[in-house]
Every structure is written in structure tokens, then in C-alpha cells.
Amino acid sequence: MRIIEEVIGKEVLDSSAIIIGKVKDVEIDIETQRIESFILGKGGISEGLGISKGETIVPYEMVKKIGDKILLKSGIEESELEI
């Protein structure tokens, strides 16, 4: 899917414009072909080498806007995201 190729690598920001990670994968419902969530990596050298274990799952419902970056809705704290 083209949309997946366009969002992989985008930075994800909370409502305070703080970067919480970059999209490294996307979960899709095969039957409806809709995005269910984004899987974020924390970045850094360990992720670049493929040895990072830190992932954050952001449900698509938490996304406010997708542009050059992905902005989450206000009231979403990093502690609310699935790790």
C-alpha cells in the first residue's frame, strides 16, 4: 500500500510538539484495509542497528493529523500509549 510507504519514517509528535518516536511499521486490518495503529521506534543508534527493543504502539484513533509529521490529539500522554 502506498500510504504505508509514505508514513514509515515519519516523526510522531504529541500535542505539545514533543517527538515521541518515528513510525517503523503499520498494523492494518486485512479485511477492511484500514490502518489500526502505528508502531513507533524510539530512534537512536541501537534502532539503526536493529537491536532496539523499545516500541510504542499508537492506535490510529489517537492521530489528529498526518502531514510532514504525525500529530496526536491533545490530551494524549506518552504514558497512555502501549509499550
Image: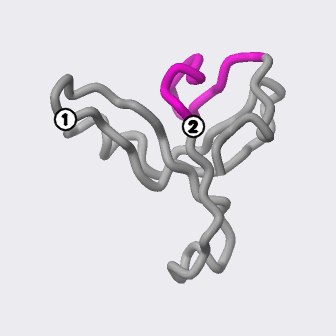
Q: Give the residue at x 58% y 51%.
A: 22
Give the residue type at disc 2.
Val
Quadrant location of the N terminus? top left
Q: Position of residue 49 (x, y in %)?
A: 54, 83
70 or 32, which lies in front?
32
Mark 2: secondary structure = strand
As for residue 70 lying within the magenta part, the answer is yes
Task: Reply above or below: 50 against 15.
Answer: below
Q: Name the residue tied to disc 1.
A: 30
Look at the image and give the residue range highlighted in magenta.
58-74
Q: Name the residue tied to disc 2.
A: 58
68 or 56, which lies in front?
56
Q: How far, Cα to Cα, is label 1 from label 2? A: 18 Å
What count of labels does the image hold?
Answer: 2
Could you tell me if the residues under marks 1 and 2 are in contact, i.e. CB atoms within 8 Å?
Answer: no
Label at residue 40 = none
Mark 1: secondary structure = loop
Give the residue type at disc 1.
Ile
Task: Reply above or below: 81 against 54.
Answer: above
Q: Give the residue at x 80% y 40%.
A: 79
Task: Reply above or below: 68 against 74.
Answer: below
Q: Give the residue at x 21% y 28%.
A: 33
Snapshot quadrant of residue 65: top right
Q: Position of residue 11 (x, y in %)?
A: 60, 44
Q: Give the residue at x 68% y 39%.
A: 81
As for residue 2 lying within the magenta part, the answer is no
At label 2, counting other C-alpha atoms closer than 10 Å, the crowd grade (few under 14, some 14-19, many 20 or more) is: many
Q: Position of residue 55 (x, y in %)?
A: 60, 58
Snapshot quadrant of residue 18: top right
